[in-house]
Image (cartoon, helix red, strand yellow):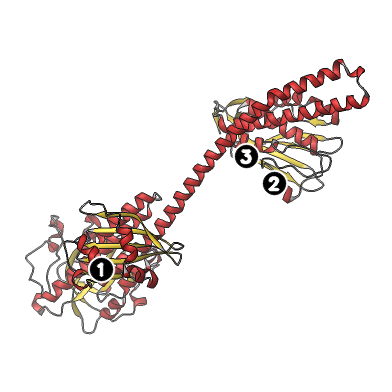
């Protein structure tokens, strides 16, 4: 059996309901000529169950007098226009003369994916007039298809002509609806969605104005979001005040169904009458907007030049578009809120970095003076100081050095976010050796042993920043490693053109909960006899990610920890991976 899901999934469920319940016999064929959809009227006309129609060809059901189904299909698909011709339904008992019109069935992007066939019984036409030739919308000049050249057709009976016009109008509306839904769903810009929705709804209903309002459930009030008016006159600011007083407004929002007013039938006591007279509206349609089962707004559509009420079919089509717009508007509003939050977060981060940078600089100068005088006391006057006083001065020196390290970390953290650097080819071995020199004191004090390769691959990076990465990873391994610390430095080249570097310690390892807290500013691992300010790993993460890599941790309790980071490898010829 032919799989019709590709077609039916592209039809809105409400649109499918309209087509399914239409009095016109409607069939949809794919481009191979197989029927993939038939409605109930089609089943009744052909005398064949829908499941038996699916997968069959049109030629098995209809026979044409002056053309063939293939010739008609070539015009519909090749020229993207509608055609019609007289035929006989061979499967009905007895065979019935019918008039068949064919129309392109496009996807959202306009590509034709099938053909819509609408068949109507020719009951009102005499037998000798039931063989009207194919009637394309424009003259077809291909001599190879002389059988379907437009010839003066016998004027159809009024009922047949009316049915044909109604079917063509429905087809145009369905195609217009499909295009409108695609246009609205294509953007996340709130203003663009509002403008597109209001314009498309006016075009779909041939209306003169469309006003869109947002509903605040907490305040129980509407607010104006946007509009489209053919006369290009913006609505008066009092429209919201008026709208909140309308009786129809409350009814539409409470009952969640559309409501239509015509000027000649509106009571003069209703405020809606005054609004319609002020804006020269003959017809006014109210429709609720809902998203995830919550009322989100209201849509008003009005006619000025025409006093014909909107038909049930038009309102059904409009509600489909409103439902899609409700979803698109909600998504666009969420996107706008997210954009605003991100911008506020960006500004907040910049202010925080600026504050940290300013405070760090302000603290660094007086702290340097304290460190300097404390070291002079220990160096030049310790012999004259009591032992207890010497311990106090040493305590001052040690803690001011720690404060100095914290300030340097704050400055590094702020500068990495702010600075923009271009990655250059970097030889990693000299950087690792320089990091070891900086950490020489703590390495000697702890008795740490470091194993590392003699050569490293060349990668893309920024040498000063990468030195900070190695300093933080190695010092972290000293702090949290075993006693004495045994540290292994290594690397591996990955298949995706990245190089992963690591520093492994022989410590107690980290639990899953501890691993989740890593790389977060001001977070310290809660292990005995270890103190720190918790900035090191967050600096590493910020540096590595800004250089296009990733940080990581591999650890099990009792097995030590391996801290990793990746960078792009330098390929032969000086290119990145």
Name the one closer to the observer, 3 or 484.
484
- Choose the circle earlier in sequence order: 3 or 2: 2
Residue 418 in view here:
yes
Q: How many marks?
A: 3
Work out whether 406 lies above or below 276: above
- Choose the circle earlier in sequence order: 3 or 1: 1
SS state under label 1: strand
Q: Quadrant of residue 421?
A: top right
Quick one: label 1, few (<14), some, or many (20+) residues within 10 Å?
many
Q: In 3D space, how far apart are the residues under numbered discs 1 and 2 (Cα atoms)?
A: 63 Å
Name the one closer to the observer, 495 or 107.
107
211 relative to 165 in the view: left or right: right
Q: Which mark is residue 117?
A: 1
**Disc 3 to disc 2: CB gap under 8 Å:** no
**Residue hosting label 2:** 517
Q: Give the residue drawn at x 26%, y 61%.
A: 204
Name the one closer to the observer, 261 or 323.
261
Residue 457 in view here:
no
405 relative to 149 in the view: left or right: right
Quick one: label 3, few (<14), some, or many (20+) residues within 10 Å?
some
- Choose the circle earlier in sequence order: 1 or 2: 1
SS state under label 2: loop
**Residue hosting label 3:** 550
Q: Nearer the viewer, mark 1 or mark 2?
A: 2
Residue 353, given in percent of the width and then of the height, sits at 59, 34
């Amino acid at each position: 059996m032919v799989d019709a899901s590709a077609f039916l999934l592209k039809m809105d469920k409400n649109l499918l309901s309209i087509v399914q319940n239409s009095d016109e016999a409607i069939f949809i064929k794919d481009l191979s000529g197989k029927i993939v959809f038939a409605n109930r009227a089609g089943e009744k006309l052909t005398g064949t169950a829908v499941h038996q129609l699916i997968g069959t060809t049109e030629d098995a059901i209809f026979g044409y007098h002056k053309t063939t189904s293939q010739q008609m299909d070539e015009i519909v698909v090749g020229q993207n226009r509608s055609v019609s011709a007289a035929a006989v339904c061979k499967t009905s008992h007895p065979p019935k003369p019918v008039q068949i019109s064919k129309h392109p069935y496009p996807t959202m992007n306009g590509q034709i994916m099938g053909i819509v066939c609408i068949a109507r019984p020719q009951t009102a036409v005499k037998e000798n007039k039931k063989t009207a030739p194919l009637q394309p919308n424009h003259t077809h000049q291909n001599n190879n298809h002389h059988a379907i050249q437009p010839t003066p057709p016998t004027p159809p009976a009024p009922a047949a002509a009316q049915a044909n016009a109604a079917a063509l109008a429905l087809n145009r509306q369905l195609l217009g609806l499909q295009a409108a839904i695609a246009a609205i769903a294509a953007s996340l810009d709130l203003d663009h969605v509002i403008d597109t929705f209001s314009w498309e709804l006016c075009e779909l209903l041939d209306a003169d104005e469309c006003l869109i309002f947002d509903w605040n459930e907490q305040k129980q009030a509407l607010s104006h979001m946007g509009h489209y008016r053919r006369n290009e006159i913006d609505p008066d600011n009092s429209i919201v005040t008026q709208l909140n007083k309308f009786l129809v407004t409350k009814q539409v929002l409470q009952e969640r169904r559309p409501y239509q007013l015509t000027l000649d039938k509106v009571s003069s006591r209703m405020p809606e009458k005054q609004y319609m007279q002020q804006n020269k509206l003959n017809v006014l349609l109210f429709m609720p907007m809902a998203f995830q089962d919550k009322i989100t707004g209201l849509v008003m559509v009005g006619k000025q030049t025409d006093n014909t009420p909107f038909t049930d079919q038009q309102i059904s089509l409009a509600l489909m578009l409103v439902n899609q717009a409700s979803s698109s508007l909600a998504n666009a509003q969420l996107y706008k809120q997210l954009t605003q939050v991100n911008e506020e977060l960006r500004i907040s981060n910049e202010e925080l970095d600026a504050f940290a940078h300013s405070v760090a600089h302000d603290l660094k100068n007086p702290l340097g003076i304290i460190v300097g005088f404390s070291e002079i006391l220990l160096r030049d006057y310790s012999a004259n100081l009591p032992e207890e006083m010497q311990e106090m001065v040493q305590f001052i020196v040690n803690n001011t050095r720690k404060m100095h390290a914290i300030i340097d970390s704050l400055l590094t953290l702020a500068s990495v976010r702010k600075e923009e650097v271009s990655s250059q080819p970097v030889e990693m071995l000299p950087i690792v050796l320089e990091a070891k020199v900086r950490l020489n004191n703590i390495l000697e004090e702890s008795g740490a042993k470091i194993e590392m390769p003699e050569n490293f691959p060349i990668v893309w990076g920024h040498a000063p920043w990468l030195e900070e990465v190695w300093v933080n990873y190695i010092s972290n391994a000293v702090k949290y490693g075993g006693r004495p610390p045994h540290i292994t430095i290594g690397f591996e080249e990955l298949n995706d053109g990245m190089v992963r570097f690591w520093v492994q310690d022989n410590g107690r390892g980290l639990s899953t909960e501890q691993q989740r807290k890593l790389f977060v500013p001001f977070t310290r691992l809660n292990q005995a006899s270890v103190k720190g300010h918790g900035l090191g790993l967050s600096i590493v993460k910020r540096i590595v990610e800004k250089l296009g890599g990733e940080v990581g941790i591999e650890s099990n309790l009792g097995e030590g920890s391996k801290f990793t980071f990746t960078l792009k490898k330098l390929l032969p010829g000086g290119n990145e991976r």
